């Protein structure tokens, strides 16, 4: 059985990191969870592909994130948890983000991270794909496997093969990649783990050298910014 208290503590860390990176202003939430981020962002426009009775917060807009029915240049911030990893076409999703963000706006995401420990965790626990595939930008996971997702998508598209971002969404650039999690997420699988233990393990992450953090982590905060308009 899942350890609900430990999972809640780990989710609180994810939401907290996203909130800390989000700019002030109009916000669009791309949901793929049960409403944790929406609950922390009152006043934000919440979207999702499907209606979920599990969500404690109403979804205001039902749509695919690859086809947002929204005007261009309308949000200062777009955010989501585990959204890119569930997209069959990350290029299309990021093109929509580029279109809908205001100049100088920011995309803030918490996504799976596939370092050594993260790869094992997502493959074993979540049964997700953990490889980039032949075309990670347009064929990250088959549509029929979208709910399961591809844990390697964010790291592949935004770190190891991020040259594609300049081709598909040239106004966007990655400003921060911060892996975390690792042992804390593994701890959520144990019924003996307490929220205090999860928080202690997350705190220990901050002392890891960058190279070890990349191997050890199972999640990452990604911050992507849209080029501001330069006055002439």
Image (cartoon, rainbow, N blue to C red):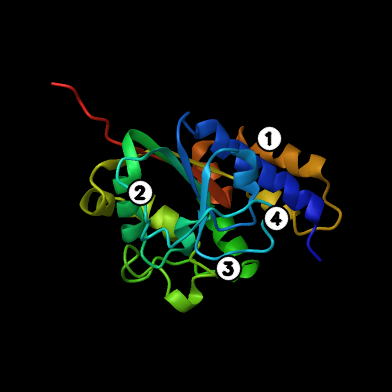
Furthest residue in direction bottom, as rendered = 144
Viewer-nearest of discs 2 and 4: 2
List the residue tagged with mark 4.
186
Mark 4 vs mark 3: which is more N-terminal? Answer: 3
Q: Nearer the viewer, residue 96 or 139?
A: 96
Q: Which part of the image, by quadrant, shows the N terminus?
A: bottom right
Q: Residue furthest left?
A: 232
* 2 and 1 marks in contact (CB < 8 Å): no
Q: Are marks 4 and 1 in contact (CB under 8 Å)?
A: no
Residue 136 vertical position relative to residue 57 in the rendered view, above or below: below
Does dot 3 land on a helix, a strand or a loop? helix
- Residue to which mark 2 is pinned: 97
Q: Where residue 91 sits: x, y (%)?
A: 31, 59
Per the model, the C-alpha gap separating discs 2 and 3 is 28 Å
Mark toward the viewer: 2 or 3: 2
Q: Quadrant of residue 174?
A: top left
Residue at mark 1 to residue at mark 3: CA–CA distance = 25 Å
Across and down, in percent, residue 35 comes to: 63, 52
Percent coordinates x, y for residue 73 in the rendering: 31, 40
Q: Please give the residue where the numbered disc 1 appears in the rendered image.
A: 203
| Front residue of this view, candidates 226 and 199 | 226
CA–CA distance in space, label 4 to label 1: 15 Å
Disc on the earlier residue, 4 or 1: 4
Q: CA distance from mark 2 to mark 1?
A: 32 Å
Dot in front, 2 or 1: 2
Q: Which mark is residue 123?
A: 3
**Label 2: element kind:** helix
Lower position in the chain sequence, tag 2 or tag 3 = 2
């Amino acid at each position: 059985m899942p350890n609900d208290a430990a999972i809640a503590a780990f989710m609180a860390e994810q939401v907290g990191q996203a909130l800390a990176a989000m700019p002030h202003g109009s916000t669009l939430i791309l949901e793929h969870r049960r409403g944790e981020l929406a609950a922390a962002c009152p006043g934000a426009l919440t979207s999702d592909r499907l209606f979920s009775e599990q969500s404690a917060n109403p979804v205001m807009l039902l749509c695919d994130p690859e086809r947002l029915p929204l005007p261009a240049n309308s949000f200062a911030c777009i955010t989501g948890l585990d959204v890119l990893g569930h997209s069959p076409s990350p290029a299309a999703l990021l093109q929509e983000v580029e279109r809908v963000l205001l100049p100088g706006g920011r995309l803030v995401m918490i996504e799976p991270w596939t370092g050594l420990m993260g790869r094992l965790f997502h493959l074993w626990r979540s049964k997700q794909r953990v490889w980039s595939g032949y075309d990670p930008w347009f064929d990250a996971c088959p549509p029929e496997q979208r709910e399961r997702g591809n844990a390697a998508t964010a790291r592949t598209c935004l770190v190891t093969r991020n040259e594609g971002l300049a081709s598909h969404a040239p106004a966007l650039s990655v400003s921060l990649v911060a892996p975390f999690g690792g042992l804390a997420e593994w701890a959520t699988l144990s019924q003996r783990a307490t929220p205090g233990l999860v928080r202690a393990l997350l705190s220990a992450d901050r002392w890891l050298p960058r190279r070890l953090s990349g191997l050890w982590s199972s999640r990452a905060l990604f911050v992507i910014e849209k080029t501001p308009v330069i006055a002439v």
